[in-house]
Amino acid sequence: MRKWEFYTAKELKPKGWLKRQLEIQAAGLSGNLDKMWPDIKESAWIGGGREGWERVPYWLDGFIPLAYALENEDMICRAKTYIEAILAAQKEDGWICPCSEEARPTYDPWAIELISKVLVVYYQCSNDERIPDVLYRVLKNYYELLKNGTVSLFGWGEFRWFEALIAIGFTYERRKEAWLKELAQILKKQGADYDSYIELWKTPLNWWRLQTHIVNLNMMLKTEAVGCDLLDEPYSDHAEYLRGILDQYNGTVFEGFTGDECLAGVSPIQGTELCSIVELMYSYEWLYAFTGDPKWAERLEVLAFNALPATLSDDMWTHQYLQMSNQISCEKFPGKAVFRTNGPESHLFGLEPTYGCCTANFNQGWPKFALSAFMRGKNKVLSAFMLPCELNDDGIRVAVETEYPFKNRAKYRVEAQKDFELVIRIPSFAQNVKINGNAFEGSEVCLEIKKGANTEICVEFEAPPCHQKRPNGLYALRAGSLIFSLPIAYETRMHEYERDGVCRKFPYCDYELIPKSAWNYAFCSPELFLEPREISAIPFSSKEPPVVVKAKMKQIDWGMEDGYETVCAKIPHSLTPCSAEEEVELWPYACAKLRMTEMPLLP
Protein backbone atom coordinates (compact mmCIF):
# COMPACT_ATOMS: atom_id res chain seq x y z
CA MET A 1 0.00 0.00 0.00
CA ARG A 2 1.47 3.33 -1.07
CA LYS A 3 2.17 5.69 1.83
CA TRP A 4 1.78 8.94 -0.13
CA GLU A 5 -0.20 9.91 -3.23
CA PHE A 6 0.87 12.42 -5.86
CA TYR A 7 -0.98 15.67 -6.36
CA THR A 8 -1.91 16.82 -9.85
CA ALA A 9 -1.28 20.02 -11.78
CA LYS A 10 -4.81 21.15 -10.89
CA GLU A 11 -3.90 21.25 -7.19
CA LEU A 12 -0.21 22.14 -7.13
CA LYS A 13 1.30 25.16 -8.87
CA PRO A 14 4.96 26.17 -9.09
CA LYS A 15 6.07 29.59 -7.89
CA GLY A 16 9.29 31.55 -7.67
CA TRP A 17 12.44 30.15 -9.26
CA LEU A 18 10.75 26.82 -9.95
CA LYS A 19 8.04 28.44 -12.08
CA ARG A 20 10.73 30.37 -13.91
CA GLN A 21 12.57 27.12 -14.62
CA LEU A 22 9.43 25.62 -16.13
CA GLU A 23 8.79 28.77 -18.15
CA ILE A 24 12.29 28.56 -19.64
CA GLN A 25 11.63 24.92 -20.51
CA ALA A 26 8.32 25.83 -22.16
CA ALA A 27 10.02 28.53 -24.23
CA GLY A 28 12.74 26.10 -25.33
CA LEU A 29 12.76 22.67 -26.96
CA SER A 30 10.01 21.21 -24.79
CA GLY A 31 7.46 23.80 -25.82
CA ASN A 32 8.41 23.85 -29.50
CA LEU A 33 9.21 20.32 -30.67
CA ASP A 34 5.79 19.99 -32.29
CA LYS A 35 6.56 23.06 -34.39
CA MET A 36 10.03 22.20 -35.69
CA TRP A 37 11.13 18.59 -35.07
CA PRO A 38 9.88 16.15 -37.74
CA ASP A 39 9.65 13.19 -35.36
CA ILE A 40 6.98 15.08 -33.39
CA LYS A 41 5.57 17.46 -36.01
CA GLU A 42 5.10 14.72 -38.62
CA SER A 43 4.80 11.65 -36.41
CA ALA A 44 2.86 8.56 -37.43
CA TRP A 45 0.96 8.98 -34.14
CA ILE A 46 -0.89 11.90 -35.77
CA GLY A 47 -1.07 10.48 -39.28
CA GLY A 48 2.32 11.57 -40.58
CA GLY A 49 5.17 9.56 -42.01
CA ARG A 50 7.84 9.96 -39.31
CA GLU A 51 8.62 7.87 -36.24
CA GLY A 52 5.58 6.15 -34.75
CA TRP A 53 7.00 4.51 -31.67
CA GLU A 54 8.41 6.21 -28.55
CA ARG A 55 9.11 9.84 -29.41
CA VAL A 56 5.63 11.37 -29.34
CA PRO A 57 4.68 9.50 -26.13
CA TYR A 58 8.02 10.51 -24.57
CA TRP A 59 7.40 14.15 -25.43
CA LEU A 60 3.79 14.15 -24.24
CA ASP A 61 4.89 12.58 -20.94
CA GLY A 62 6.62 15.87 -20.10
CA PHE A 63 4.79 18.37 -22.30
CA ILE A 64 1.40 17.59 -20.77
CA PRO A 65 2.30 18.21 -17.09
CA LEU A 66 4.42 21.21 -18.15
CA ALA A 67 1.45 22.77 -19.97
CA TYR A 68 -0.98 22.20 -17.11
CA ALA A 69 1.46 23.22 -14.36
CA LEU A 70 1.97 26.56 -16.12
CA GLU A 71 -1.73 26.85 -17.05
CA ASN A 72 -0.56 27.65 -20.58
CA GLU A 73 -3.70 27.48 -22.70
CA ASP A 74 -1.84 27.34 -26.00
CA MET A 75 0.26 24.39 -24.85
CA ILE A 76 -2.78 22.65 -23.37
CA CYS A 77 -4.61 23.04 -26.69
CA ARG A 78 -1.63 21.60 -28.59
CA ALA A 79 -1.37 18.66 -26.19
CA LYS A 80 -5.06 17.95 -26.72
CA THR A 81 -4.55 17.99 -30.49
CA TYR A 82 -2.13 15.08 -30.14
CA ILE A 83 -4.29 13.22 -27.64
CA GLU A 84 -7.38 13.60 -29.85
CA ALA A 85 -5.48 12.21 -32.85
CA ILE A 86 -4.25 9.25 -30.80
CA LEU A 87 -7.72 8.49 -29.40
CA ALA A 88 -9.33 8.83 -32.83
CA ALA A 89 -6.93 6.25 -34.24
CA GLN A 90 -7.64 3.63 -31.56
CA LYS A 91 -8.92 0.42 -33.16
CA GLU A 92 -12.19 -1.25 -32.22
CA ASP A 93 -10.32 -4.02 -30.41
CA GLY A 94 -8.41 -1.45 -28.30
CA TRP A 95 -5.06 -1.37 -30.15
CA ILE A 96 -3.78 2.21 -30.04
CA CYS A 97 -0.30 2.32 -31.59
CA PRO A 98 0.29 3.44 -35.20
CA CYS A 99 0.99 0.18 -36.99
CA SER A 100 -1.03 -2.23 -39.13
CA GLU A 101 -2.64 -5.33 -37.66
CA GLU A 102 -0.21 -7.49 -39.61
CA ALA A 103 2.77 -5.64 -38.11
CA ARG A 104 1.67 -5.99 -34.48
CA PRO A 105 3.79 -9.10 -33.71
CA THR A 106 6.96 -7.25 -34.79
CA TYR A 107 6.05 -3.87 -33.27
CA ASP A 108 8.10 -3.48 -30.07
CA PRO A 109 5.49 -3.35 -27.26
CA TRP A 110 7.47 -0.74 -25.36
CA ALA A 111 5.30 1.86 -27.11
CA ILE A 112 2.14 0.27 -25.67
CA GLU A 113 3.57 0.40 -22.17
CA LEU A 114 4.70 3.99 -22.65
CA ILE A 115 1.53 5.45 -24.19
CA SER A 116 -0.51 3.78 -21.44
CA LYS A 117 1.54 5.62 -18.81
CA VAL A 118 1.16 8.88 -20.74
CA LEU A 119 -2.62 8.55 -20.83
CA VAL A 120 -2.60 8.26 -17.02
CA VAL A 121 -0.60 11.49 -16.83
CA TYR A 122 -3.04 13.16 -19.22
CA TYR A 123 -6.05 12.08 -17.16
CA GLN A 124 -4.47 13.34 -13.94
CA CYS A 125 -3.89 16.74 -15.55
CA SER A 126 -7.06 17.11 -17.63
CA ASN A 127 -9.62 14.93 -15.84
CA ASP A 128 -10.81 13.83 -19.29
CA GLU A 129 -13.39 11.20 -18.38
CA ARG A 130 -12.87 9.28 -21.64
CA ILE A 131 -9.38 8.20 -20.63
CA PRO A 132 -10.17 5.43 -18.10
CA ASP A 133 -12.25 3.62 -20.75
CA VAL A 134 -9.61 4.17 -23.42
CA LEU A 135 -6.97 2.71 -21.11
CA TYR A 136 -9.20 -0.20 -20.17
CA ARG A 137 -9.53 -1.13 -23.85
CA VAL A 138 -5.79 -0.68 -24.50
CA LEU A 139 -4.88 -2.96 -21.63
CA LYS A 140 -7.57 -5.54 -22.37
CA ASN A 141 -6.31 -5.76 -25.94
CA TYR A 142 -2.71 -6.07 -24.72
CA TYR A 143 -3.78 -8.83 -22.32
CA GLU A 144 -5.61 -10.79 -25.01
CA LEU A 145 -2.77 -10.50 -27.53
CA LEU A 146 -0.20 -11.62 -24.96
CA LYS A 147 -2.36 -14.45 -23.68
CA ASN A 148 -3.14 -15.91 -27.11
CA GLY A 149 0.46 -15.49 -28.27
CA THR A 150 -0.21 -13.00 -31.07
CA VAL A 151 2.35 -10.69 -29.46
CA SER A 152 5.06 -11.36 -26.92
CA LEU A 153 7.60 -9.25 -25.10
CA PHE A 154 10.91 -8.66 -26.85
CA GLY A 155 13.44 -5.87 -27.20
CA TRP A 156 12.74 -2.72 -25.23
CA GLY A 157 9.28 -3.92 -24.22
CA GLU A 158 10.78 -6.98 -22.56
CA PHE A 159 13.21 -4.86 -20.56
CA ARG A 160 10.65 -2.17 -19.66
CA TRP A 161 7.64 -4.38 -18.92
CA PHE A 162 7.11 -2.82 -15.47
CA GLU A 163 6.24 0.57 -17.01
CA ALA A 164 2.83 -0.89 -17.92
CA LEU A 165 2.12 -1.48 -14.23
CA ILE A 166 1.41 2.23 -13.73
CA ALA A 167 -1.57 2.13 -16.10
CA ILE A 168 -2.62 -1.32 -14.87
CA GLY A 169 -2.65 -0.06 -11.29
CA PHE A 170 -4.61 3.04 -12.31
CA THR A 171 -7.19 0.86 -14.06
CA TYR A 172 -7.38 -1.74 -11.27
CA GLU A 173 -8.23 1.00 -8.77
CA ARG A 174 -11.33 1.70 -10.86
CA ARG A 175 -12.25 -1.81 -12.00
CA LYS A 176 -11.23 -4.63 -9.73
CA GLU A 177 -11.14 -7.19 -12.53
CA ALA A 178 -8.95 -10.26 -12.15
CA TRP A 179 -7.53 -10.15 -15.66
CA LEU A 180 -5.64 -6.94 -14.81
CA LYS A 181 -3.63 -8.75 -12.16
CA GLU A 182 -3.18 -11.63 -14.57
CA LEU A 183 -1.81 -9.18 -17.14
CA ALA A 184 0.71 -7.97 -14.58
CA GLN A 185 1.79 -11.59 -13.98
CA ILE A 186 2.12 -12.28 -17.73
CA LEU A 187 4.31 -9.22 -18.14
CA LYS A 188 6.53 -10.22 -15.25
CA LYS A 189 6.87 -13.77 -16.60
CA GLN A 190 7.80 -12.61 -20.09
CA GLY A 191 9.77 -9.59 -18.92
CA ALA A 192 13.46 -9.39 -18.14
CA ASP A 193 14.62 -10.65 -14.74
CA TYR A 194 17.18 -8.04 -13.75
CA ASP A 195 18.48 -10.02 -10.79
CA SER A 196 19.95 -12.50 -13.24
CA TYR A 197 22.10 -9.76 -14.81
CA ILE A 198 23.70 -8.36 -11.65
CA GLU A 199 27.15 -9.79 -12.36
CA LEU A 200 27.16 -7.95 -15.70
CA TRP A 201 26.91 -4.62 -13.85
CA LYS A 202 30.18 -5.12 -12.00
CA THR A 203 32.59 -5.10 -14.95
CA PRO A 204 31.62 -2.46 -17.51
CA LEU A 205 32.49 -3.39 -21.08
CA ASN A 206 32.59 -1.55 -24.38
CA TRP A 207 29.62 -3.62 -25.46
CA TRP A 208 26.06 -2.42 -26.09
CA ARG A 209 23.36 -4.63 -24.58
CA LEU A 210 19.93 -4.24 -23.08
CA GLN A 211 20.93 -5.93 -19.82
CA THR A 212 23.29 -3.08 -18.86
CA HIS A 213 21.49 -0.22 -20.61
CA ILE A 214 21.44 2.67 -18.13
CA VAL A 215 17.91 3.88 -18.94
CA ASN A 216 16.46 0.39 -18.54
CA LEU A 217 18.17 0.03 -15.17
CA ASN A 218 17.04 3.40 -13.86
CA MET A 219 13.45 2.66 -14.88
CA MET A 220 13.68 -0.80 -13.33
CA LEU A 221 14.42 0.45 -9.81
CA LYS A 222 10.78 1.43 -9.25
CA THR A 223 9.42 -2.05 -10.12
CA GLU A 224 8.40 -2.98 -6.56
CA ALA A 225 6.93 0.45 -5.90
CA VAL A 226 4.61 0.30 -8.92
CA GLY A 227 3.96 -3.42 -8.91
CA CYS A 228 4.09 -5.27 -5.61
CA ASP A 229 0.40 -4.69 -4.84
CA LEU A 230 -0.70 -5.84 -8.30
CA LEU A 231 1.61 -8.85 -8.13
CA ASP A 232 0.50 -9.67 -4.55
CA GLU A 233 4.11 -9.58 -3.38
CA PRO A 234 5.46 -8.06 -0.15
CA TYR A 235 7.59 -4.95 -0.47
CA SER A 236 11.20 -5.84 0.32
CA ASP A 237 13.12 -2.65 -0.58
CA HIS A 238 14.89 -4.63 -3.27
CA ALA A 239 15.55 -1.37 -5.08
CA GLU A 240 17.99 -0.40 -2.33
CA TYR A 241 19.96 -3.61 -2.84
CA LEU A 242 20.09 -3.15 -6.61
CA ARG A 243 20.90 0.56 -6.35
CA GLY A 244 23.74 -0.26 -3.97
CA ILE A 245 25.36 -2.56 -6.51
CA LEU A 246 24.92 -0.05 -9.31
CA ASP A 247 26.40 2.68 -7.13
CA GLN A 248 29.38 0.62 -6.00
CA TYR A 249 30.46 -0.24 -9.53
CA ASN A 250 29.04 2.65 -11.59
CA GLY A 251 28.15 5.43 -9.15
CA THR A 252 28.44 9.16 -9.74
CA VAL A 253 28.71 12.11 -7.41
CA PHE A 254 25.17 13.22 -8.35
CA GLU A 255 23.37 10.08 -7.05
CA GLY A 256 23.02 8.55 -10.50
CA PHE A 257 25.14 6.11 -12.46
CA THR A 258 27.39 6.26 -15.49
CA GLY A 259 25.90 4.94 -18.67
CA ASP A 260 27.06 5.95 -22.12
CA GLU A 261 24.79 4.34 -22.97
CA CYS A 262 25.50 1.16 -21.05
CA LEU A 263 27.06 0.99 -17.60
CA ALA A 264 30.51 2.57 -17.68
CA GLY A 265 32.20 2.24 -14.27
CA VAL A 266 33.10 4.86 -11.66
CA SER A 267 35.42 7.03 -13.73
CA PRO A 268 34.48 10.75 -13.69
CA ILE A 269 35.33 11.00 -17.41
CA GLN A 270 32.63 8.54 -18.46
CA GLY A 271 29.21 9.78 -19.49
CA THR A 272 25.67 9.60 -18.15
CA GLU A 273 22.75 9.68 -20.58
CA LEU A 274 20.15 12.42 -20.06
CA CYS A 275 17.24 9.95 -20.43
CA SER A 276 18.66 8.03 -17.49
CA ILE A 277 18.59 11.13 -15.29
CA VAL A 278 14.89 11.88 -15.79
CA GLU A 279 13.92 8.21 -15.54
CA LEU A 280 15.88 7.80 -12.31
CA MET A 281 14.18 10.91 -10.94
CA TYR A 282 10.81 9.34 -11.75
CA SER A 283 11.83 6.08 -10.08
CA TYR A 284 12.94 7.94 -6.96
CA GLU A 285 9.63 9.85 -6.92
CA TRP A 286 7.68 6.58 -6.96
CA LEU A 287 9.96 4.94 -4.40
CA TYR A 288 9.58 7.85 -2.00
CA ALA A 289 5.81 8.05 -2.47
CA PHE A 290 5.39 4.31 -1.95
CA THR A 291 7.70 3.90 1.05
CA GLY A 292 7.97 7.32 2.66
CA ASP A 293 11.66 6.53 3.15
CA PRO A 294 13.54 9.86 2.99
CA LYS A 295 16.64 8.33 1.40
CA TRP A 296 14.83 8.32 -1.94
CA ALA A 297 13.83 11.97 -1.55
CA GLU A 298 17.38 13.06 -0.79
CA ARG A 299 18.77 11.19 -3.80
CA LEU A 300 16.09 12.75 -5.98
CA GLU A 301 17.02 16.26 -4.85
CA VAL A 302 20.67 15.75 -5.75
CA LEU A 303 19.73 14.53 -9.23
CA ALA A 304 17.24 17.34 -9.80
CA PHE A 305 19.44 20.18 -8.59
CA ASN A 306 22.65 19.01 -10.25
CA ALA A 307 22.56 16.42 -13.03
CA LEU A 308 19.37 17.57 -14.76
CA PRO A 309 20.14 21.28 -15.23
CA ALA A 310 23.83 20.57 -15.87
CA THR A 311 23.11 18.81 -19.15
CA LEU A 312 20.72 21.49 -20.46
CA SER A 313 21.70 24.85 -21.91
CA ASP A 314 20.54 27.96 -20.05
CA ASP A 315 17.71 28.54 -22.53
CA MET A 316 16.86 24.80 -22.72
CA TRP A 317 16.98 24.89 -26.51
CA THR A 318 19.86 22.40 -26.51
CA HIS A 319 21.00 19.48 -24.40
CA GLN A 320 23.73 16.90 -24.14
CA TYR A 321 23.15 13.22 -24.69
CA LEU A 322 25.93 12.53 -22.18
CA GLN A 323 27.33 14.57 -19.32
CA MET A 324 30.65 13.95 -17.53
CA SER A 325 31.50 14.83 -13.92
CA ASN A 326 34.98 15.95 -15.00
CA GLN A 327 34.14 17.61 -18.30
CA ILE A 328 36.92 19.93 -19.48
CA SER A 329 35.70 20.21 -23.07
CA CYS A 330 32.67 19.52 -25.22
CA GLU A 331 34.42 19.18 -28.58
CA LYS A 332 33.72 16.50 -31.17
CA PHE A 333 36.25 13.69 -30.94
CA PRO A 334 38.26 13.41 -34.16
CA GLY A 335 38.59 9.66 -33.68
CA LYS A 336 37.26 7.15 -31.14
CA ALA A 337 35.15 8.71 -28.41
CA VAL A 338 36.19 8.23 -24.80
CA PHE A 339 32.71 6.82 -24.18
CA ARG A 340 32.23 3.07 -24.10
CA THR A 341 29.22 2.73 -26.40
CA ASN A 342 28.38 6.22 -27.71
CA GLY A 343 29.80 8.32 -30.49
CA PRO A 344 32.03 11.38 -30.85
CA GLU A 345 29.25 14.02 -30.64
CA SER A 346 27.42 12.66 -27.60
CA HIS A 347 28.61 15.35 -25.15
CA LEU A 348 27.93 18.32 -27.46
CA PHE A 349 24.96 20.58 -26.72
CA GLY A 350 22.47 20.27 -29.53
CA LEU A 351 19.04 19.30 -30.84
CA GLU A 352 19.58 15.54 -30.87
CA PRO A 353 23.24 14.65 -30.32
CA THR A 354 23.64 10.88 -30.91
CA TYR A 355 19.93 9.89 -30.66
CA GLY A 356 16.67 11.79 -30.40
CA CYS A 357 15.27 9.83 -27.45
CA CYS A 358 16.60 12.38 -24.96
CA THR A 359 15.31 15.25 -27.09
CA ALA A 360 11.80 13.93 -26.49
CA ASN A 361 12.21 12.40 -23.03
CA PHE A 362 14.09 15.02 -20.98
CA ASN A 363 10.86 17.06 -20.87
CA GLN A 364 9.41 15.02 -17.99
CA GLY A 365 12.17 15.84 -15.49
CA TRP A 366 11.24 19.28 -14.17
CA PRO A 367 7.41 19.08 -14.43
CA LYS A 368 7.14 15.77 -12.58
CA PHE A 369 9.61 16.90 -9.93
CA ALA A 370 7.60 20.10 -9.44
CA LEU A 371 4.45 18.01 -8.98
CA SER A 372 6.21 15.97 -6.28
CA ALA A 373 6.75 19.00 -4.03
CA PHE A 374 3.71 18.00 -1.96
CA MET A 375 2.15 14.57 -1.48
CA ARG A 376 -0.97 13.52 0.36
CA GLY A 377 -1.88 10.78 2.81
CA LYS A 378 -4.90 10.05 4.95
CA ASN A 379 -5.75 13.47 6.41
CA LYS A 380 -2.08 14.40 5.99
CA VAL A 381 -0.19 16.72 3.66
CA LEU A 382 3.53 16.14 3.17
CA SER A 383 5.95 18.85 2.10
CA ALA A 384 8.24 16.37 0.39
CA PHE A 385 10.58 18.90 -1.23
CA MET A 386 11.16 22.46 -0.08
CA LEU A 387 10.24 24.04 -3.42
CA PRO A 388 8.49 27.37 -4.10
CA CYS A 389 4.91 26.42 -4.89
CA GLU A 390 1.30 26.68 -3.81
CA LEU A 391 -1.03 23.81 -2.93
CA ASN A 392 -4.81 24.23 -3.10
CA ASP A 393 -6.70 21.05 -2.27
CA ASP A 394 -10.17 20.61 -0.79
CA GLY A 395 -10.09 23.47 1.69
CA ILE A 396 -6.33 23.36 2.27
CA ARG A 397 -4.00 26.07 1.00
CA VAL A 398 -0.27 25.93 1.63
CA ALA A 399 2.03 28.48 -0.02
CA VAL A 400 5.79 28.01 0.20
CA GLU A 401 8.21 30.89 -0.27
CA THR A 402 11.78 29.68 -0.59
CA GLU A 403 15.00 29.92 -2.56
CA TYR A 404 16.05 26.42 -1.52
CA PRO A 405 18.42 24.74 -2.43
CA PHE A 406 20.41 27.97 -2.85
CA LYS A 407 19.36 29.24 0.59
CA ASN A 408 18.22 26.95 3.39
CA ARG A 409 15.12 28.77 4.51
CA ALA A 410 11.42 28.46 3.71
CA LYS A 411 8.24 30.17 4.88
CA TYR A 412 4.98 28.19 4.84
CA ARG A 413 1.68 30.06 4.87
CA VAL A 414 -1.22 27.76 5.68
CA GLU A 415 -4.96 28.39 5.41
CA ALA A 416 -7.28 25.56 6.44
CA GLN A 417 -10.99 24.96 6.12
CA LYS A 418 -10.63 21.61 7.86
CA ASP A 419 -8.36 19.85 10.33
CA PHE A 420 -5.31 18.10 8.89
CA GLU A 421 -1.69 17.27 9.70
CA LEU A 422 1.11 19.07 7.86
CA VAL A 423 4.34 17.12 7.64
CA ILE A 424 7.55 18.86 6.53
CA ARG A 425 10.52 16.67 5.60
CA ILE A 426 13.85 17.84 7.01
CA PRO A 427 16.95 16.66 5.11
CA SER A 428 19.35 14.44 7.06
CA PHE A 429 22.25 16.81 6.31
CA ALA A 430 20.48 19.81 7.92
CA GLN A 431 22.26 21.28 10.94
CA ASN A 432 21.02 23.76 13.55
CA VAL A 433 17.44 23.37 12.39
CA LYS A 434 15.01 26.00 13.63
CA ILE A 435 11.23 26.06 13.37
CA ASN A 436 9.87 29.56 13.94
CA GLY A 437 13.16 30.40 15.65
CA ASN A 438 13.11 27.40 17.99
CA ALA A 439 15.68 24.60 17.83
CA PHE A 440 14.37 21.36 16.34
CA GLU A 441 15.72 17.84 16.07
CA GLY A 442 14.20 15.18 13.88
CA SER A 443 13.56 14.17 10.28
CA GLU A 444 9.98 15.46 10.07
CA VAL A 445 8.10 18.42 11.44
CA CYS A 446 4.53 17.29 12.20
CA LEU A 447 2.00 20.05 12.83
CA GLU A 448 -1.69 19.67 13.65
CA ILE A 449 -3.50 22.37 11.66
CA LYS A 450 -6.98 23.26 12.88
CA LYS A 451 -9.93 24.35 10.80
CA GLY A 452 -10.01 28.11 10.34
CA ALA A 453 -6.33 28.48 11.15
CA ASN A 454 -4.03 30.89 9.32
CA THR A 455 -0.60 29.63 10.22
CA GLU A 456 2.94 30.66 9.33
CA ILE A 457 5.85 28.28 9.74
CA CYS A 458 9.44 29.30 9.10
CA VAL A 459 11.96 26.50 8.57
CA GLU A 460 15.66 27.25 8.42
CA PHE A 461 18.83 25.26 8.81
CA GLU A 462 22.50 25.15 7.89
CA ALA A 463 24.24 22.86 5.41
CA PRO A 464 27.95 23.71 5.54
CA PRO A 465 30.12 22.77 2.58
CA CYS A 466 32.28 19.68 3.00
CA HIS A 467 34.54 17.39 1.03
CA GLN A 468 32.95 14.10 0.00
CA LYS A 469 35.21 11.13 -0.67
CA ARG A 470 34.96 9.61 -4.15
CA PRO A 471 36.66 6.60 -5.78
CA ASN A 472 40.26 6.73 -7.04
CA GLY A 473 41.44 8.95 -4.18
CA LEU A 474 39.41 11.94 -5.38
CA TYR A 475 37.01 14.25 -3.55
CA ALA A 476 33.94 16.28 -4.45
CA LEU A 477 32.56 19.34 -2.70
CA ARG A 478 29.00 19.29 -1.45
CA ALA A 479 26.76 21.62 0.53
CA GLY A 480 23.35 20.13 1.26
CA SER A 481 21.88 18.83 -1.99
CA LEU A 482 24.19 20.94 -4.16
CA ILE A 483 27.42 19.61 -5.65
CA PHE A 484 30.05 22.26 -6.44
CA SER A 485 32.53 22.17 -9.30
CA LEU A 486 35.48 24.16 -10.52
CA PRO A 487 34.02 26.15 -13.47
CA ILE A 488 36.07 26.30 -16.66
CA ALA A 489 35.68 29.37 -18.85
CA TYR A 490 34.87 28.56 -22.46
CA GLU A 491 33.93 29.90 -25.84
CA THR A 492 31.24 28.36 -28.00
CA ARG A 493 31.49 27.13 -31.58
CA MET A 494 28.09 26.96 -33.30
CA HIS A 495 27.20 24.47 -36.03
CA GLU A 496 24.11 24.88 -38.24
CA TYR A 497 23.43 22.05 -40.71
CA GLU A 498 20.91 19.49 -41.93
CA ARG A 499 21.25 15.73 -41.58
CA ASP A 500 18.75 12.93 -42.31
CA GLY A 501 16.07 15.49 -43.06
CA VAL A 502 16.46 17.22 -39.67
CA CYS A 503 17.57 20.84 -39.69
CA ARG A 504 19.73 22.27 -36.93
CA LYS A 505 19.56 26.04 -36.91
CA PHE A 506 19.73 28.67 -34.19
CA PRO A 507 18.59 28.34 -31.44
CA TYR A 508 18.44 24.55 -31.76
CA CYS A 509 21.73 24.01 -33.55
CA ASP A 510 24.78 22.22 -32.15
CA TYR A 511 27.40 23.81 -29.96
CA GLU A 512 30.91 22.82 -29.01
CA LEU A 513 32.36 24.30 -25.80
CA ILE A 514 36.09 25.02 -26.02
CA PRO A 515 37.93 25.55 -22.70
CA LYS A 516 39.71 28.86 -22.05
CA SER A 517 40.90 28.58 -18.45
CA ALA A 518 42.95 26.24 -16.27
CA TRP A 519 41.26 23.13 -14.93
CA ASN A 520 44.13 21.10 -13.41
CA TYR A 521 43.43 21.87 -9.75
CA ALA A 522 43.47 20.07 -6.41
CA PHE A 523 42.00 21.07 -3.07
CA CYS A 524 44.75 22.01 -0.62
CA SER A 525 42.84 22.96 2.52
CA PRO A 526 39.74 21.79 4.40
CA GLU A 527 38.64 25.43 4.74
CA LEU A 528 35.53 26.18 2.68
CA PHE A 529 33.39 29.32 2.62
CA LEU A 530 29.85 29.36 1.24
CA GLU A 531 28.60 32.64 -0.26
CA PRO A 532 24.93 32.97 -1.24
CA ARG A 533 24.11 35.32 -4.13
CA GLU A 534 20.97 36.46 -5.88
CA ILE A 535 19.05 34.10 -8.15
CA SER A 536 19.05 35.51 -11.66
CA ALA A 537 16.31 35.17 -14.27
CA ILE A 538 17.94 31.82 -15.08
CA PRO A 539 18.01 29.86 -11.79
CA PHE A 540 20.93 27.60 -12.80
CA SER A 541 22.70 30.25 -14.82
CA SER A 542 26.06 29.42 -16.40
CA LYS A 543 27.06 33.07 -15.99
CA GLU A 544 25.52 34.18 -12.67
CA PRO A 545 25.59 31.34 -10.13
CA PRO A 546 23.10 31.75 -7.26
CA VAL A 547 25.64 30.55 -4.69
CA VAL A 548 29.38 29.83 -4.69
CA VAL A 549 31.89 28.13 -2.43
CA LYS A 550 35.37 29.57 -2.02
CA ALA A 551 38.14 27.02 -1.56
CA LYS A 552 41.93 27.01 -1.31
CA MET A 553 43.40 25.18 -4.31
CA LYS A 554 46.65 24.56 -6.17
CA GLN A 555 47.33 23.54 -9.73
CA ILE A 556 48.89 20.11 -10.27
CA ASP A 557 50.30 18.15 -13.19
CA TRP A 558 47.02 16.39 -13.94
CA GLY A 559 47.59 15.38 -17.55
CA MET A 560 45.36 14.04 -20.31
CA GLU A 561 43.74 10.64 -20.75
CA ASP A 562 45.94 8.51 -22.97
CA GLY A 563 45.01 9.08 -26.62
CA TYR A 564 42.95 12.24 -26.07
CA GLU A 565 43.60 15.97 -26.28
CA THR A 566 40.29 17.14 -24.77
CA VAL A 567 39.75 14.68 -21.90
CA CYS A 568 41.55 14.93 -18.57
CA ALA A 569 43.12 11.79 -17.18
CA LYS A 570 40.88 9.64 -15.02
CA ILE A 571 43.43 10.04 -12.20
CA PRO A 572 46.04 12.84 -11.99
CA HIS A 573 49.49 11.94 -13.27
CA SER A 574 51.03 13.68 -10.26
CA LEU A 575 49.89 15.34 -7.04
CA THR A 576 52.93 17.62 -6.95
CA PRO A 577 51.74 21.26 -6.94
CA CYS A 578 52.86 23.43 -9.82
CA SER A 579 51.42 26.74 -8.59
CA ALA A 580 50.99 28.76 -5.44
CA GLU A 581 47.86 28.44 -3.34
CA GLU A 582 44.85 30.31 -4.73
CA GLU A 583 41.38 31.09 -3.45
CA VAL A 584 39.09 29.70 -6.14
CA GLU A 585 35.33 30.06 -6.59
CA LEU A 586 33.47 26.82 -7.14
CA TRP A 587 30.04 26.97 -8.71
CA PRO A 588 27.03 24.69 -8.46
CA TYR A 589 27.63 21.65 -10.68
CA ALA A 590 24.62 22.59 -12.81
CA CYS A 591 25.99 26.08 -13.52
CA ALA A 592 29.45 24.92 -14.61
CA LYS A 593 28.92 23.50 -18.11
CA LEU A 594 32.64 22.80 -18.31
CA ARG A 595 33.86 21.66 -14.92
CA MET A 596 36.10 19.64 -12.68
CA THR A 597 34.08 18.00 -9.92
CA GLU A 598 36.17 15.14 -8.56
CA MET A 599 39.63 16.34 -7.57
CA PRO A 600 42.40 15.36 -5.12
CA LEU A 601 42.69 16.79 -1.61
CA LEU A 602 46.38 17.45 -1.04
CA PRO A 603 47.84 16.58 2.38
Image (tube, grey):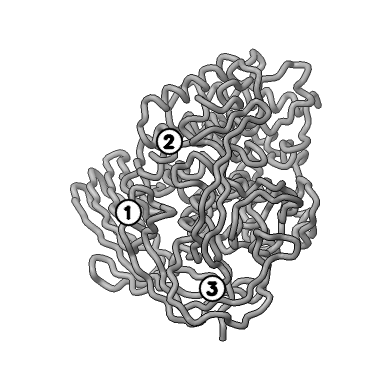
User: In this figure, which residue is indicated by the disc labeled 2?
Assistant: 26
User: In this figure, which residue is indicated by the disc labeled 3?
Assistant: 468
Q: Quadrant for the C terminus, please.
A: bottom right
Residue depth check, mark 3 versus mark 1: number of the one nearer the observer? 3
The spot of residue 244 in percent (x, y) is 65, 63
Please tell me which residue lies in front, 310 or 13. Answer: 310
Q: CA distance from mark 3 to mark 1?
A: 36 Å
Q: Note whether residue 148 is visible.
A: no
Q: Is residue 62 left or right of residue 228?
A: left
Amino acid beneath label 3: Gln
> Would you call the spot at circle 3 few (<14 residues within 10 Å), some (14-19), or many (20 or more)?
some
Q: Secondary structure at mark 2?
A: helix
| Residue 135 versus residue 398 in the image, above or below | above
Please tell me which residue lies in front, 201 or 484. Answer: 484
Image point (40%, 47%), residue name: 376
Q: Of all residues shown, which one is farthest toward the bottom?
A: 603
Disc 2, disc 1: CB below 8 Å? Answer: no
User: In this figure, which residue is indicated by the disc labeled 1?
Assistant: 421
